[in-house]
Image: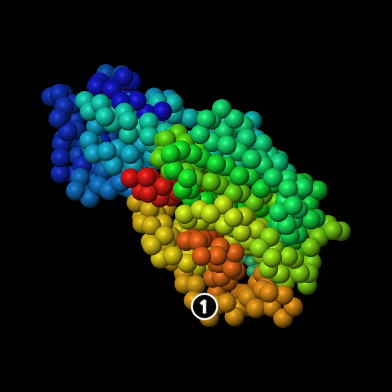
């Protein structure tokens, strides 16, 4: 945790150094700071021991170049440095009284404190507490806001990191119910096979057919503004394991496919954070949770499934299952007459080819909403770039046997757009944005405040977007 106090309360003291500024300290310390000015270089940490006090100089480069993202990385570096030295507590002298800078710093600190060590006998070392030394009381509010958002990110990361044989659709549904059991503003409803059959969700049920685990569509209603009937819908891909189905994925692609519910998990975390913050908006999450397995009852390439919207879909590839699950959830979303629909999905490997591991692809039928998502991403550093949904791409999903097929061009040309064009068929005229997070959902190694494994991408983005709307 981060506490705000007027005086340091630990024998480990971090002194942040800017190149152009010397902190005001007592004479003894000032002298030492003067001697250590060379550590003002960004990322430099140096420890000295004075009278049994451990003093750590931490470089912050030039003050005028400090941005919120730099502060985030600094918060992360401070956490990692203390952890590497196995210090449990430390104090840090104030280096900025700007809310946005402290927010970034606190985010970096808290997000780096996450680890998934449930299955390890030897647990990760943790740093328990950092005291930010300042006379500015309001900074306490900034830190508690950050803790509320990071709780959401943590929930998402742990859901995604959980092993696939545990984190099946029922586990996600039960965890969601438990998470919101005591909330007065959040209601959770879970639809099982029977209800999904009644809703004629033929595409979602088709994907789920080879799995012995019941599919679950989880509906989470957050009422932050009960006086209004208007609400926004978040649709999440919750494929708890994607083997590819009969179009089986090869070795090298299967190992992380538990992350294929990263969209659904991000929505759970984001709604939790919004509830924590008391955001004045109404948001409904619709999460399509299924497993895509192989079995004697598998859906097959060549099959035709009938979606809840009534459109028939030729199955050209059982590994393009996400769009099938989402098609029924998106149609369900339209029946609830929302203001906007945003879907979050690990939809295509092609998104990874386009944008790499750090950024998402975004597309939609409403430029204003796309721009809002892009802007929110810039603000919180969960960034995305837009791909076009030109009408010409509709040709790519034409089928000779059904209304549409679940695959674009055979060689995967414009594969991410083909996914978006398919989804667009199910949102009617509602303002809608699709965010393909196949790249940033998972990190192969730690990078500052992004841990190895599940990143929690999407939580801070959605919270930022709805914070902007609620203003
Ligand atoms: N879940 C995958 C996409 C994915 C790939 C997510 C890598 C995360 C990391 C999705 O269901 C899938 O398999 N997509 C296919 C689509 C293709 C058959 C049109 C793909 O990307 O190969
Ligand atoms: Zn797939
Ligand atoms: Zn998938």
Q: Which residue lies most toward the left here?
A: 27
Residue 157: image location, x then y, percent: 55, 42
> In this orientation, does residue 328 appear?
yes
Q: Residue at x 25, y 47 (%)?
A: 66
Q: Residue at x 14, y 30 (%)?
A: 24
Residue labelled with disc 1: 391
Seen from the viewer's position, the closer of residues 123 and 438 is: 438
Dividing the image into 4 quarters, which one contains the C terminus?
top left
Looking at the image, residue 122 sits to the left or right of residue 99; the answer is right
Q: Residue at x 27, y 48 (%)?
A: 67
Dividing the image into 4 quarters, which one contains the N terminus?
top left
Q: How is the image coloured?
A: rainbow
Seen from the viewer's position, the closer of residues 321 and 163 is: 321
Residue 426: image location, x then y, percent: 59, 64
Q: Quadrant of residue 165?
A: top right
**Element type where label 1 sits in the image:** helix
Q: Is mark 1 within 8 Å of ligand 1?
A: no
Residue 384: image location, x then y, percent: 43, 60
Rendered position, 239 above or below 186: below
Question: How many discs mark residues in the rendered view?
Answer: 1
> In this orientation, does residue 252 appear?
no
């Amino acid at each position: 945790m981060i506490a705000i106090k007027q005086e340091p309360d630990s024998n480990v003291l971090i002194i942040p150094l800017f190149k152009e500024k010397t902190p005001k300290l007592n004479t003894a310390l000032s002298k030492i700071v003067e001697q250590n000015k060379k550590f003002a270089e960004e990322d430099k940490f140096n420890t000295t021991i004075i009278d049994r006090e451990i003093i750590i100089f931490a470089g912050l480069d030039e003050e005028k170049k400090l941005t919120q993202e730099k502060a985030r990385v600094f918060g992360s570096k401070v956490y990692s440095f203390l952890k590497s030295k196995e210090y449990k507590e430390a104090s840090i002298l104030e280096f900025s009284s700007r809310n946005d800078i402290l927010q970034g710093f606190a985010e970096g600190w808290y997000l780096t404190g996450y680890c998934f060590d449930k299955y390890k006998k030897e647990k990760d070392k943790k740093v328990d507490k950092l005291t930010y030394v300042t006379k500015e009381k309001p900074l306490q509010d900034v830190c508690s806001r950050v803790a509320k958002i990071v709780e959401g990110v943590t929930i998402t990361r742990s859901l995604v990191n959980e092993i696939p044989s545990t984190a099946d659709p029922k586990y996600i549904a039960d965890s969601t119910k438990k998470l919101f059991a005591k909330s007065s503003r959040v209601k959770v409803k879970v639809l099982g096979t029977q209800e999904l059959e009644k809703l004629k969700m033929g595409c979602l049920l088709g994907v789920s057919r080879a799995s012995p685990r019941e599919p679950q569509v989880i509906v989470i209603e957050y009422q932050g503004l009960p006086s209004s009937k208007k609400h926004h819908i978040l649709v999440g891909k919750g494929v708890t394991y994607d083997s590819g189905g009969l179009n089986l994925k090869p070795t090298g692609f299967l190992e992380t496919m538990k992350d294929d519910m990263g969209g659904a998990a991000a929505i759970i975390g984001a709604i939790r954070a919004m509830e924590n913050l008391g955001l004045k908006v109404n948001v409904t999450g619709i999460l399509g949770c299924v497993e895509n397995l192989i079995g004697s009852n598998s859906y097959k390439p060549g099959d035709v499934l009938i979606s809840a919207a009534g459109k028939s879909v030729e199955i050209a590839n059982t590994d393009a299952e996400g769009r099938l699950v989402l098609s029924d959830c998106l149609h369900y979303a339209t029946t609830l007459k929302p203001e906007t629909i945003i879907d979050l999905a690990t939809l295509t490997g092609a998104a990874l080819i386009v944008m790499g591991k750090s950024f998402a692809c975004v597309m939609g039928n409403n430029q204003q909403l796309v721009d809002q998502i892009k802007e929110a991403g810039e603000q919180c550093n969960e960034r995305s770039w837009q791909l076009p949904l030109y009408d010409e791409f509709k040709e790519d999903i034409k089928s000779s046997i059904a209304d549409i097929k679940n695959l674009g061009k055979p060689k995967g040309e414009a594969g991410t757009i083909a996914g978006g064009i398919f989804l667009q068929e199910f949102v009617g005229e509602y303002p809608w944005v699709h965010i393909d997070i196949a790249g940033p959902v998972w990190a192969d190694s730690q990078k500052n405040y992004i841990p190895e494994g599940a990143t929690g991408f999407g939580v801070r983005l959605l919270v930022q977007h709805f914070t902007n709307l609620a203003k």
